[in-house]
Image (cartoon, rainbow, N blue to C red):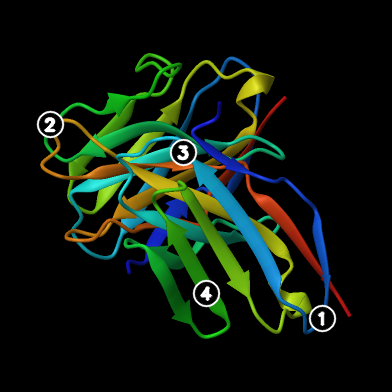
């Protein structure tokens, strides 16, 4: 079982629709969860972080976390063609003897295509 | 967040040679990370670089192949040694902003080995 699992897609949605991206993780000790957006040929860009159960909204983006189910999702409302990218889910893993720092474990990413 | 730059942005190298990639941050950070992203793949952590100590390497990566320097709180280098075509990847540095768990990435170095 992979530590962080995502459906590779592509997920195709029409412009204006809600895109729903899902991620599951295996380590119950994970405390921090992140969504990165990566355009083709570019580096990952952090778009959402979530640390507690429930929903967190930022503009058109909503992150949802359910630690009991080990599940985190990203909703993109009113999807635009400019949202077409690969979305990477990442979870933290504590670095031993580091004074509280973490490394990130990334999923394989879900490719989102928003068509006009 | 932090502003991160990398040099070079891309390079084409011959097998058997080495390339050193630089990563510069606009603020002092304790922890820097080096990742590799092979074509069509996700990110794989190579090593963690903490200023003032030896880098910590992930399983499958060794210091002889990927030596890392971290001379101060704003700079790090990753060397890809004795390169083969399998080393063709994008190499990314990232930083964890002190006091937060979030990581921010540099623009990456696209390496092609022929």
Using the image, tell me which numbered label, if any, was put on residue B6.
none
Q: Is residue A44 left or right of residue A116?
A: left
Where disc 2 sits, the SS reads loop
Q: Position of residue B21 (x, y in %)?
A: 44, 40
**Residues under labels 4 and 3: Cα distance?**
27 Å
Q: Is residue B103 left or right of residue A59?
A: left
**Residues under labels 2 and 4: Cα distance?**
34 Å
State which tag comes first along the sequence, 1 or 4. Answer: 1
Figure quadrant of the N terminus of chain B: bottom left
Image mark 1: chain: A
Q: Is residue A96 left or right of residue B47?
A: left
| Residue that mark 2 sits on | A97
Where disc 4 sits, the SS reads strand
Mark 3 surroundings: few (<14), some (14-19) or many (≥20) residues within 10 A: many
| Quadrant in the rendering for residue A65 | bottom left
Tag 2 and tag 1, C-beta contact below 8 Å: no
State which tag comes first along the sequence, 2 or 4. Answer: 4
Query: Compared to A97, does A24 lie above or below?
Result: below
| Residue that mark 3 sits on | B35
Q: Position of residue A64 (x, y in %)?
A: 48, 65
State which tag comes first along the sequence, 2 or 1. Answer: 1
| Residue that mark 4 sits on | A62
| Residue that mark 1 sits on | A15
């Amino acid at each position: 079982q992979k530590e962080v699992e995502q459906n590779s897609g592509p997920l195709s949605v029409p412009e204006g629709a809600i895109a729903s991206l899902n991620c599951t993780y295996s380590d119950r000790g994970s405390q921090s969860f992140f969504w990165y957006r990566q355009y083709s040929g570019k580096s990952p860009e952090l778009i959402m972080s979530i640390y507690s159960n429930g929903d967190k909204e930022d503009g058109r983006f909503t992150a949802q976390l359910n630690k009991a189910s080990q599940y985190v999702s990203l909703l993109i409302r009113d999807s635009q063609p400019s949202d077409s990218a690969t979305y990477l889910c990442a979870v933290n893993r504590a670095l031993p003897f580091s004074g509280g720092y973490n490394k990130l474990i990334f999923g394989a990413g879900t490719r989102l295509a928003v068509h006009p | 967040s932090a502003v991160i730059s990398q040099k070079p942005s891309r390079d084409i190298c011959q097998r058997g040679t080495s390339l050193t990639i630089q990563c510069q941050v606009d603020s002092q950070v304790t922890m820097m990370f080096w990742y590799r992203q092979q074509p069509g793949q996700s990110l794989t952590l190579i090593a963690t670089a903490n200023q003032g100590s030896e880098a910590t390497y992930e399983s499958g990566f060794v210091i002889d192949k990927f030596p890392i320097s971290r001379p101060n709180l704003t700079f790090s280098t990753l060397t890809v040694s004795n390169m083969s075509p399998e080393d063709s990847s994008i190499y990314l540095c990232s930083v964890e902003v002190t006091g937060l768990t979030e990581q921010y990435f540099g623009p990456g170095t696209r390496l092609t080995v022929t």
